Amino acid sequence: MVVAKEQESVIAANELGVLIAALLRRDYEVIGPVMRDGAIVYDSVESIKDLPAGWTDEQEPGRYRLKRRNDGALFGYAVGPQSWKKYLHPANVRLWAAERENGTFRILNQEQRLKKRYAFLGVRSCDLAAIGVQDRVLLEDRRQDPIYAARRDGVFIVAVQCIDAVSTCFCASMGTGPQARAGYDLALTELIDKGEHRFLVQTGSEAGRDVLAELGQREATDEDRQLAQAVVDRAAAAQVRHMDTTNIRELLYSNFDHPRWDNVAERCLACANCTSVCPTCFCTTVEDMSDLSGEHAERWRRLDSCFTLDFSYIHGGSVRASTKARYRQWMTHKLASWIDQFGSSGCVGCGRCITWCPVGIDITEELEAIRGTVADGNP
Amino acid sequence: MLRIEPRELSNPMAPAPYVVRSVSRETADTFTLVLEPLNGASVGSFKPGQFGMLWSFGVGEVPISMSGDTDDSTRMVYTIRSVGQASRALVTTRPGVSLGVRGPFGTSWPVDAACGRDVIIVAGGVGLAPVRPIVYRVLRNRSEYGRLIILYGTRRPGDLLFRKELALWARQPNTQVLITVDSGGQAWRGHVGVVTTLFRHARLQPARSVAMVCGPEIMMRFAARELETLGVTTSDIYLSMERNMKCAVGFCGHCQWGPHFICKDGPVFPYDRIRPLLGHHEL
Amino acid sequence: METLERIIAEHPFFAGLEAQYTTLLVGCASNVRFGAGTYIFKEGQEANEFFLIRQGRVALEIFAPQRKPTIIETLGEGEILGWSWLLPPYQWRFHARAVEQTRAIALDGRCLRTKCEENHDLGYELLKRFAKIIERRLEGTRLQLMDVYAAD
């Protein structure tokens, strides 16, 4: 893992404010991490003051807490409950409206244009990989989702290299981090040592170079680079969870009747938290509605989850009626079927599903149980 | 930074208006609708086995297979069983009303690949509707196909679809039509038993046949197994699968079955590809 | 005109039977004919024969109070009608009615039962074949039970 030597600069931590301003001046809507309701979430950011300086997080299965840190780091935490799909694959979209007209009907309002393009500030490597996974699903398959395309087009990405990991992270074993290597316009590694709070900046595109040119900067020294490498290495080494993806397709396809599914079904509440926080889950539903007069109709698209009973409903009942079947569907799809469908795993090892599961189900542990390397029984 | 070249020319989520020309009742809960595009526009080119998403203004959409002559580009025919709110809205519509149609979607029956071979159609219940386009195609190009064998089963005599046409097809050259019901009254003088009991009465040449099966999943599973036992190659047996569908364009994820999206990898599948999935409960 | 011997010997149901058993069966066989609507046997009657249908259609019927008789299965050319002759209490479980003019070969079950008791090899051969039929009918019946065409 060698940090590239070319195109690296160092900017002072405060210069991040100038970066945000430069993006705003280019008419981006800047989205970054903010602290709200005890969690780090994503929202519009106007200045450096909006960022959660000096905060860190502790994450365990079913547990998320923010804690103060003593170094004023701007990105000293892992990922929170939200992911960039909040903006790229939004939860509620009106697809069109229709009106009755001359004995028939007419479809109106199909445009899916944004007022401003997005700039994402603080994209972790796992989330960068997740964006890539959703790109594959929604842009590069047989069809292109026009809503995703409109939102994804021209997004400016400022990635942030992770300097630490929480206990639920397992991106290293998924090959999706902790170092972001491509797919960003700029990548920042936060360095705090000897009282100097700064960022090592890597550029990844012409657009990135263009923005960087407006910032006060100096060339990166070998010391900067070594420190940057060290913190990223530490983030990788700090990961305690791993997923062994060897032959994972064959493993899950040949274990539809493994007793572990019954075991996890006893714990799973089918609350759908995991699908909500997962950065790659893309399932949606379509809702048709009309007003009281019956003259005006709308079709909406909403995020959905395979954990709901309705998800697989056909006349006669739901195909996946039991929680067991639904958990099995989610995990098998995420880790195995996805490979057949889209050429890669659907999981990026961000660990959100583990943290935000109210009963703390751990997908890495469930997989190992099916492999047979974990003694059966409750964790 | 990713720049995207828009690929979609039209919005696949927006229905086009079609006028209902006729609504005819087939059985107590099943109706056939004939739709024509507005202003003499041409219908999208449907192939046998493909389906459209039919929309009743403001109510909802359901996936329905085309059940008419797919080579007729002036109209679309759908046979719909009323099982829920959206399908009920469709069958209670009237001539002159506009319905929305999106489509065609999905994979089709291998009618071209079956040229020169015997065609075995096994249908159950309303499953006779999605295979009717195959019969039309074969009968219109009769010399291009070998034997045509239609095996059809349903619950009771009153549930039989297209009775007049079945009788008509039975009189066609080199064609055998066998019908059965799960239970019958004394007035029924035909066969009683599940559709698989018809196989032994059919003039089958399994090794020369392409089989197309459509009906409830359990029925298709047993029929496919029986066909395989009789000697039809598993890659020559085709099933039309069904799952919950919302978008029909491969994005909503609802229709997934194992790694397959029924809306784009199906609904028509060769049996050898899906056999491992069929045996599993709640997949 | 085919002889009984040839029909029985060549029928798939009896395939693989030793020649001596085939001859025995022929000795218990006779041609029968039923007009349309005739009841071949009724539920509860003693079951002393089984039939190899050569032509026509036979409906198996069940009666229930307040309901019209329901046909639960029909059998046609080449199929075997009746296994209740083989197992105690040797009683028919339902009615069998010829739907149309039906020709069959009737085999004397009472005679065969005695022979099976004397010769267990013959008994085993017949039981194997009938077990297969019962299995298929059971599978079919179970599918019918599932009412797969129901709306809900």
Image (tube, coloured by chain):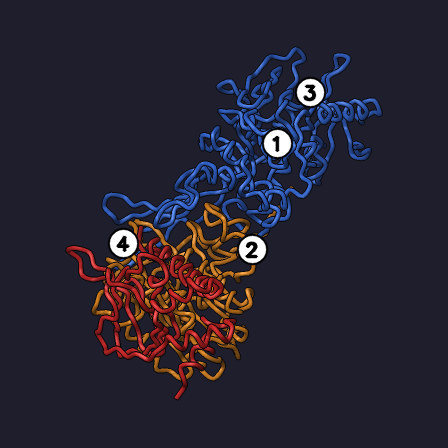
Chain colours: A blue, B orange, C red
* Mark 2 on the same chain as mark 1: yes
Chain containing the residue with disc 1:
A
Chain containing the residue with disc 3:
A
Disc on res. A364: 1
- How far apart are labels 3 and 4 at the CA level? 63 Å
Amino acid at dot 4: Arg
Q: Secondary structure at mark 2?
A: loop
* Mark 3 on the same chain as mark 2: yes
Amino acid at dot 3: Ala
Q: Secondary structure at mark 3?
A: loop
Chain containing the residue with disc 4:
B
Task: Please state the horizontal and vertical placement of residue A175, each as a whole percent of the image.
Answer: 70, 36
Amino acid at dot 2: Arg
- How far apart are labels 2 and 1 at the CA level? 31 Å
- How far apart are labels 4 and 1 at the CA level? 46 Å
Disc on res. B88: 4
Can you identify the residue that label 3 sits on?
Answer: A13
Q: Residue furthest left?
A: C66
Q: First in sequence: mark 3 or mark 2? A: 3
Q: Residue furthest bottom?
A: C1
Q: Are marks 2 and 1 in contact (CB under 8 Å)?
A: no
